[in-house]
Amino acid sequence: MDLNGRVALITGARRIGAVVAEALARRGVDVAVSYRQSKGEAERTVSQAVALGRRALAISADLTRAADCRALVARAVGELGRLDILINMASIYEARPFADLTEQDWDRMLAVELKAAFVCSQAALPHLRATRGRIINFSDWLPVGGRPRYPGYLLYYVGKAGVKALTEAMALELAPDGILVNAVAPGPILAPPETTDSDRRAVERATPLGTWGGEGEIVKAVLALLASDFITGETIRVDGGRHLR
C-alpha cells in the first residue's frame, strides 16, 4: 500500500498510539485518533500531525459502547473523506484477582479489548471495501503463545486471545474484498509507569535480546504490515524473542 494521501483511524491516542500516528503522518497519512480520558495527549498527537502538514482530528469515544464505536468511524470518514487504515489499539491493562472479578469487569474489559475491535471493523467495512484497505489489531505476546504467566490479568489475556482469533476469522472473510487483516502482539516494549528498576531489569534478563524494544519497534511492524499486499490473518510478535523462554 502506498501510504501517501491515505486516511487512518487509530483507537487509543496514548503512548504507542501517539507514536504510530506521528509515524503515519510523516509518511503522508491523515489521521484520526480516539480518546476517552487522555484528551491532552490526543490533542498533542493531532498537533504533531498538523505540524507535519497532515489533516488530523481527535475524537472522544467510549469504546465500551457500540454506538460510540460506530459514531467514531462515521465522524472520521465524514471529516477526512475516506478510510484506508483502521488500527484497533485501545486497551485496558489492569490487574485484579480472579476471585474478585465481577460480571461488570468482564463486560467492561472485553468490550474494550475485543468487542470494540469487532464493532469498529464492522462499521469501517463499507469504507475499507471502497479503498481495499487494511485492519491492524493489537493482541499481546502471551496469548499468542497460549501461555498465561501473570496472575491477575485474566480478562486482559482472554480479550487479547480473542483479538488473535478475530483477526484470523476476519482475514478469511474479508479477503474477497481485498481487505487485509493482521495483528501485532507486543512484548516488552514500554515499561508501565509503575515498573520498578528491579522489575525492569528482570524483564531485560528474561528477554533474549536483553532490552525493552521501545515504541519504534511497533511502528516498524505496523509499517511492514501496511507495506505488504500479501500478508493477511497473521499475528506478529514483537517481543525480542521473549516467547522463546
Image (cartoon, rainbow, N blue to C red):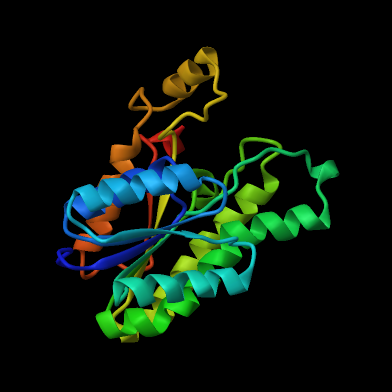
Examine the rendered structure and indicate whether residue 153 appears above or below residue 12: above
Rendering coords of residue 202 (x, y %): 50, 18
Rendering coords of residue 21 (x, y %): 31, 51
Residue at x 41%, y 27% (from the top left corner):
207
Quarter of the figure with the N terminus = bottom left
Q: For this view, does 116 lie left or right of residue 189?
A: right
Rendering coords of residue 62 (x, y %): 60, 60
Examine the rendered structure and indicate whether residue 193 appears above or below residue 26: above
Residue at x 48%, y 53% (from the top left corner):
139
Q: How many marks?
A: 0
- In-front residue for pair 229/126: 126
- In-front residue for pair 30/125: 30
Quarter occupied by residue 115: bottom right
Residue at x 48%, y 78% (from the top left corner):
123
Farthest residue, direction top: 198
- In-front residue for pair 36/146: 36
Quarter occupied by residue 160: bottom right
Q: Is residue 118 visible?
A: yes
Residue at x 29%, y 77% (from the top left corner):
81
Q: Is residue 175 visible?
A: no
Rendering coords of residue 76 (x, y %): 39, 70
Q: For this view, does 126 lie left or right of residue 91?
A: left
